[in-house]
Image (cartoon, helix red, strand yellow):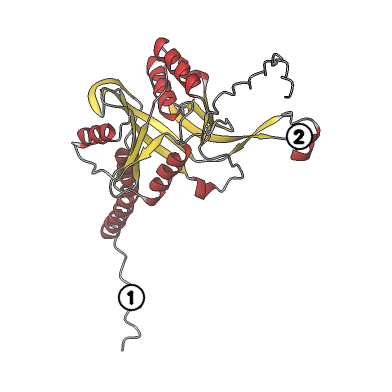
Amino acid sequence: MGKKRKHVETEAVPAEPVVPERPKRTLLGWKDKSEVEKVNDKETDSTVFRNKEKVLVTCSRRINYRYRHLMLNIVSLLPHCKKDSKVESKATKGSTLNELVELKSCSSCLFFECRKHQDLYLWMAKCPNGPSVKFLVNAVHTMEELKLTGNHLKGSRPILTFSNNFDKDAHWKLLKEMIIQIFGVPKEHRKSKPYHDHVFVFSIVDGHIWFRNYQISDKVPREDKVARGNVAGEMTLIEVGPRFCLNPIKIFAGSFGGPTLYENPYFISPNQIRALDKKKKAGKFAKKVKAKTRRKMHELSNPLEPDEFADMWKE
């Protein structure tokens, strides 16, 4: 019979380390459920403001092709905007636009209204409670017309800059706040890109708001950037376009109407300007008619003496 083996105490084998479950992968990277829950709890506990601004951009019927191109340029510059079909320019356009803004779940509206195929008015409104501003748009130059050398990433967030004149009067402060809310792209918007590579410049000259769009460019060439460790050098501004000038007419307390908060005393409608030009041209014609009548009266009052040799060669 074989000998029994001595009972030897087996050494405890170390257990394998527990590997945490791999988080799910999404289009935006790895997503851990626990971390997401923690972040959501923090957001619910703390009062964090999140900008959910959306702008509806539309125009009136019978708009000029040049003004339509300007509207499309602004749509391409604002990734947080929504474009809608044309709206009839009538007295009830305010209620129609407010309904469209509510259907599109927007909070602001830019409405390009064209009259007589030559005058462009821009309505800038916060819906549905207001305020709203009516501008006359002058000096329009689109991107296709200018053909400038500047170019920036589509959908990137702009830097808004304002001249010091916006802090002088109350109505300029109100316009500045409305422009910030409408033209400022919200952070982490799904259609925007997390870059700041262009600047929107709003400046007041002679009571008008002038708009310019510049690309932020670096003078250092790409090869030198790699050699210097991708350190940014001197920055320059290259104009991209479009260009336009806004002449404020009235500021209303409501959306597309309501009590008037401010009225521009120096505003002259384009109809009056055209009427004055016609009067000037009509004045030139009236001068010519008066000169002809004076000549005729002079000839009648001072007739020529009969010529004694006038009938000499008739025989």
Disc 2 marks which residue? 225
Disc 1 marks which residue? 308
The quadrant of the rendering that contains the C terminus is bottom left
Which three-letter amino acid code belongs to the residue tagged 2? Answer: Lys
Q: Position of residue 296 (x, y in %)?
A: 28, 58
Left or right relative to 167: residue 233: right
Query: Disc 2 on helix, strand or loop?
Result: helix
Label 1 Cα neighbours within 10 Å, binned few <14 / some 14-19 / many ≥20:
few
Q: Residue at x 39, y 31 (%)?
A: 247
Which three-letter amino acid code belongs to the residue tagged 1? Answer: Glu
Query: Disc 1 on helix, strand or loop?
Result: loop
Residue depth check, mark 1 versus mark 2: number of the one nearer the observer = 2
Q: Residue at x 46, y 29 (%)?
A: 185
**Is the Cβ of the residue at disc 1 closer than 8 Å to that at disc 2?**
no
Is residue 156 placed above or below 128 in the rendered structure? below
Query: Furthest-front residue in view?
Result: 1
Residue 211 in view of the camera: yes
Q: Position of residue 232 (x, y in %)?
A: 71, 29
Is residue 283 placed above or below 246 in the rendered structure? below
Left or right relative to 232: residue 150: left
Q: Quadrant of residue 104?
A: top left
Q: Residue at x 67, y 32 (%)?
A: 236
